[in-house]
Each structure stands twice: as C-alpha cells, then as structure tokens.
C-alpha cells in the first residue's frame, strides 16, 4: 500500500457532498451590507480569481463590486468548463455565499464598452483586473475564415450558456489542452455530431490536457489523431469540407521542454470535416486599457505584476489569475484572488503591500490510524465511480460520482499522515497542546 497517492479530490468531494446532504453547507445568515463609508474596490471579471478576491475584501469590510461581461457570474468555470464536469447548482450555491458577504456582482457589463477603465479608476480606490484569457489564438493557415470554423471558447460558451450551436456530423478539434478535450467531449454530446476527432501535432504524452480527461474522451469514442497538423482549410465556395494535414515526428525539445513537432515531408493527407473547432490556446483581451493606460505589459501581452503583491506599475491597479499567467487552473486563480485581496487591503490601509507568511499549525492532534499488516497489504486507491461512457454521451449529466462512505473511510485510513511522520513532530505537537492546555487555551 502507499504506492499510489491518496485520492484527495475524491475525499474532498465526498466531504462536500456529505455536508450538503446534511444541510451544513446551505447558505446561512443575513446578507451583509458594506458600511456607508467603506472604501470602494472594483474587480473586473467574476471568475475564480475575481470572486475569491471579492469574498476576502468584503469580509475585511470593503465595498466590492465585481463587473462581468457575460450574463452569468463564474468566469470560465460557469461559461467554459462543461456541466458534466462541474454541476451548476453547486457553483450557484458558492456564488450565493459570496454575495451574502456583501459582494455586488454586476453581470452583462463589459469594462471598455459599457464602462471605461478610466471611469472605474476614478470611482474606485483600487481595481483588480481578473479577466482571464478568453481570446482564442488563430491557426494562421489558408482558409481559416471559412464557414464551419469555430473557436473553442465561443463554442463552449454557446453550449454552456444555452445559445444555439451549429455543428455538423464530422467535427475536428485542433489542440491538446483542456479546451480541446472539453470541446470534443461537448461536441459528441450534441445530437448533430456523429464523429469527433482531436487533431494534435505532438503525441498524447505531450498533451497539456489532464490525463483523466483524455482517457474519458477516448472512452466516449473520440478519435485522437496524434502527430498531425493542419496546413490548409479545404473550403470550396467558402464552406468548410475538410482540412489538409501533414504528419509530424518529434524533434528536439523546445522552450516549453516538450519535443518539437517536425513535419514529415510528402506526408500530406486530407480529413473530411463539417466543423473545425480551433483550440490551440487563449490570450487575455486587454482592449479596455486603451492607448494611454501606462500599465506595463509582458512580451506575451499580459500585465506585468509583482509576483509577491500582484501590483502593476500603476498605483492602485492589481491583476491576477489567467490574465497574468495565461491559461492555468482554478486553484491557482483562487490563490491569486486571495493574495490580491490581502495586498489591496494593505494598500488601502496606507501600508506598502508585502505578503506575510504565517506558519499554520494543526489546531488539534489527531493520532495516525494504526493498521494491521493485512490492512496495509490490501489497502488500495479506490477507483472513482463514474457514469458508463454510453450513458454519458447522451446528456450533460455529471460524469464523476461520489465514493461510497465505506470507500471514503477506507481511503482516509490509507493516509500516511506525512505531517506527523516523525516521532519528533509528534512530540512537538503533543508539547504544544500540553502547553496550550496549561495556559487554558
Ligand atoms: C474549457 C476549459 C476547461 C478547463 N478545465 C479546467 C479544469 O478541469 N481544472 C482547472 O483547474 N482549470 C480548468 N480550466 C482553467 C480555469 O477555468 C481557469 O484557469 C480559471 O477559470 C481562471 O480564472 P480567472 O478568474 O483568472 O479567469 P476566468 O475564469 O476566465 O474569468 C474571467 C472573467 O472575466 C470576464 N471578462 C473578461 N473581460 C472582461 C471585461 N472587459 N469586462 C468585464 N468582464 C470581463 C470574462 O467574461 C470571465 O467571466 C479550464 C479552462 C477552460 C477554458
């Protein structure tokens, strides 16, 4: 046992499901309103970075308004990650809790179009830019503007937000990241699509998408065309009918550390397609900054911030989440939102922002579970239960299911308690608690 890491995500999921079922997680208490003289902070973007910053700032007494271009709050987790991976009722409950601490979320309001960035800077003491990275990169090949070519972000938003979507029977998706795999898995759930292929210029090993998502896509019948790159869109009369592709081989590693795809001469072939979804990467759209904003940008066009404080070079303007890092993860975006809130708080208190690192001590001593030899021999990581592939592709129902109580307890018992692994650490913790006990703590 112990060869496989603990299935921590499955255990957290079990704990949250249990909390919801037993009513512990339901939104509670009255809605809090900020004080009339509270300092005002504007947040652009209601993704995990913006919402997390809003939550922490409101709890520190600030009057926070989050501006969101879309008609729904939540950012990529509401508009791009499909519902079969993230149920919307759970997201709605979390957003409800964020509103209850006083965060105002103004949807359908794009900064730069509905309100200018300059206006925000005049009306608010601090601004946090958390707009994510939603501008799909172009393929830059002949015929790219043909009818039948979609960008993955627009496609996923249309499906997730219930807008009409037009795909054909044969759908090709170009790219190897999460957006590509999600676009393919969404496409096969649409009635019109009979076959979907992911076209990727490296191999499965180099794909940036999560491995379990790739596996799930293959189970759902999606074809993975590896070492293939499109070179031209075939579109007689401006309507897509296919893509001209080249086979690739892997060369020397590039700056990303992955082996560079090298075209194989004379390997051209064509794929018949009715729809081609481009999912090769995304950039932030900072159009709203205008010409004379003065914010320093990196060579990738992202705002340059201090990694310690998330402050830009412009006084009172902070930025975090995907807009700074490029496409990343929810948890990283949330961490940056929390850091931004702390730094904005220090800035508005007239201090020079600088993070404080606190050592977090366990609040109570939980002794490690003693297992018998046999239990140690037989303990294994549970397989996450999920809907069968054939059932999945007919709906947007949640794919991952919850562990049974028995499996969750068994998995928790497999934890090696690395935090308490040494005898020394154990003694120290016991001493801390004895001291706290004798101090009446
Ligand atoms: C298809 C897909 C699948 C993913 N899967 C996963 C996954 O499984 N696990 C994981 O951890 N991460 C995943 N990610 C990444 C994750 O969703 C992002 O890293 C995260 O949401 C970034 O958070 P953010 O707050 O920085 O930006 P976002 O969540 O992108 O939110 C930014 C918000 O700002 C709004 N906005 C933009 N411009 C303006 C403007 N001018 N005015 C007002 N509002 C504006 C946007 O509409 C958007 O709602 C996925 C991403 C995509 C696209």
Image: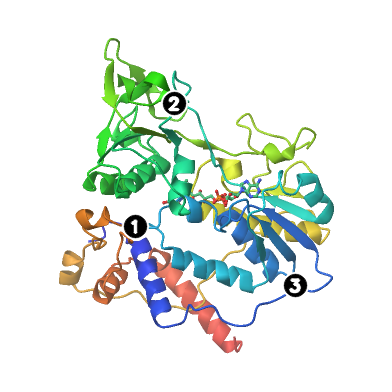
Asked whether, in this view, residue 26 is left or right of residue 45, the answer is left
Tell us which disc is closer to us: 3 or 2.
2
Residue at the (72%, 47%) spot, across then down: 311
- Dot placed on the residue nearer the N-terminal end, 3 or 2: 3
Q: How far is mark 3 from mark 2, CA to CA?
A: 51 Å
- Distance Cα–Cα, label 1 vs label 2: 29 Å
> Which residue is the site of mark 1?
396
- Figure disc tally: 3
Q: Are marks 1 and 2 in contact (CB under 8 Å)?
A: no
Q: CA distance from mark 1 to mark 3?
A: 39 Å
Look at mark 2 in the image and give the residue it sits on. 146
How crowded pointer 2 is (Cα within 10 Å; few <14, some 14-19, many 20+) is rated as some
Circle 3: element type:
loop
Query: Where's residue 14, x and y in %?
Result: 35, 71
Q: Nearer the viewer, residue 235 or 42?
A: 235
Residue drawn 42% across and 23% down? Answer: 238
Look at the image and tell me in which quarter the N terminus lies.
bottom left
Above or below: residue 195 compared with residue 353 = above
Regarding mark 2 in the picture, which secondary structure is present there? loop
Residue under label 3, please give it: 34
User: Residue, x 29% and y 46% (percent of image)?
Assistant: 188
> Which residue occupies the foreground of this view, 319 or 97?
97
What kind of element bears circle 1? loop
Dividing the picture into quadrants, the one containing residue 367 is bottom left
Residue 218 falls in image quadrant: top left
Please name which of the two marks, 1 or 2, marks the residue nearer to the observer.
2
Compare marks 1 and 3 and give the one earlier in the sequence: 3
């Amino acid at each position: 046992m112990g060869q496989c890491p603990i299935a921590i995500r499955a255990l957290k999921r079990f704990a949250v499901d249990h909390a919801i079922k037993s009513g512990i997680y339901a939104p509670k208490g009255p809605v809090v309103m900020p004080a009339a003289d509270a300092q005002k902070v504007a947040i652009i973007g209601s993704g995990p970075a913006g919402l997390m910053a809003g939550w922490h700032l409101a709890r520190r007494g600030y009057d926070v308004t989050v501006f969101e271009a879309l008609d729904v709050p939540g950012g990529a987790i509401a508009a791009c990650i499909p519902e079969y991976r993230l149920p919307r009722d759970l997201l709605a409950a979390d957003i409800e809790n964020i509103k209850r601490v006083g965060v105002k979320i103004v949807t359908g309001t794009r900064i730069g179009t509905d309100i200018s960035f300059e206006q925000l800077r005049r009306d608010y003491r601090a601004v946090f830019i958390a707009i994510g990275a939603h501008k799909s990169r172009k393929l830059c090949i002949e015929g790219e503007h043909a009818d039948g070519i979609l960008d993955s972000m627009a496609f996923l938003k249309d499906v997730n937000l219930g807008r009409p979507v037009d795909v054909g029977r044969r759908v090709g998706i170009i790219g190897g990241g999460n957006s590509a795999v999600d676009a393919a898995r969404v496409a096969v759930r649409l009635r019109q699509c009979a076959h979907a292929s992911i076209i990727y210029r490296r191999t499965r090993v180099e794909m940036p998408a999560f491995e379990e998502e790739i596996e799930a896509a293959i189970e759902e019948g999606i074809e993975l065309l590896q070492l293939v790159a499109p070179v031209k869109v075939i579109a007689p009369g401006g309507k897509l009918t296919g893509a001209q592709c080249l086979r690739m081989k892997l060369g020397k590693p590039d700056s990303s550390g992955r082996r560079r795809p090298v075209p194989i001469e004379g390997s051209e072939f064509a794929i018949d397609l009715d729809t081609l979804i481009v999912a090769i990467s995304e950039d932030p759209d900072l159009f709203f900054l205008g010409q004379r904003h003065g914010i320093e940008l990196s060579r990738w066009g992202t705002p340059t911030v201090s990694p310690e404080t998330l402050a830009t070079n412009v006084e009172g303007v902070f930025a975090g989440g995907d807009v700074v890092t490029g496409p990343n993860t929810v948890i990283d975006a949330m961490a940056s939102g929390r850091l931004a809130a702390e730094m904005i708080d220090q800035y508005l208190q007239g201090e020079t922002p600088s993070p404080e690192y606190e050592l977090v001590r366990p609040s109570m001593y939980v002794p490690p579970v003693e297992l018998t030899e046999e239990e140690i021999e037989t303990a294994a990581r549970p397989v996450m239960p999920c809907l069968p592939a054939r059932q999945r592709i007919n709906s947007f129902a949640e794919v991952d299911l919850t562990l049974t109580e028995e499996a969750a307890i068994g998995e928790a018992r497999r934890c090696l308690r690395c935090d308490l692994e040494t005898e020394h650490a154990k003694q120290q913790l016991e001493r801390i608690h004895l001291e706290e006990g004798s101090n009446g703590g």
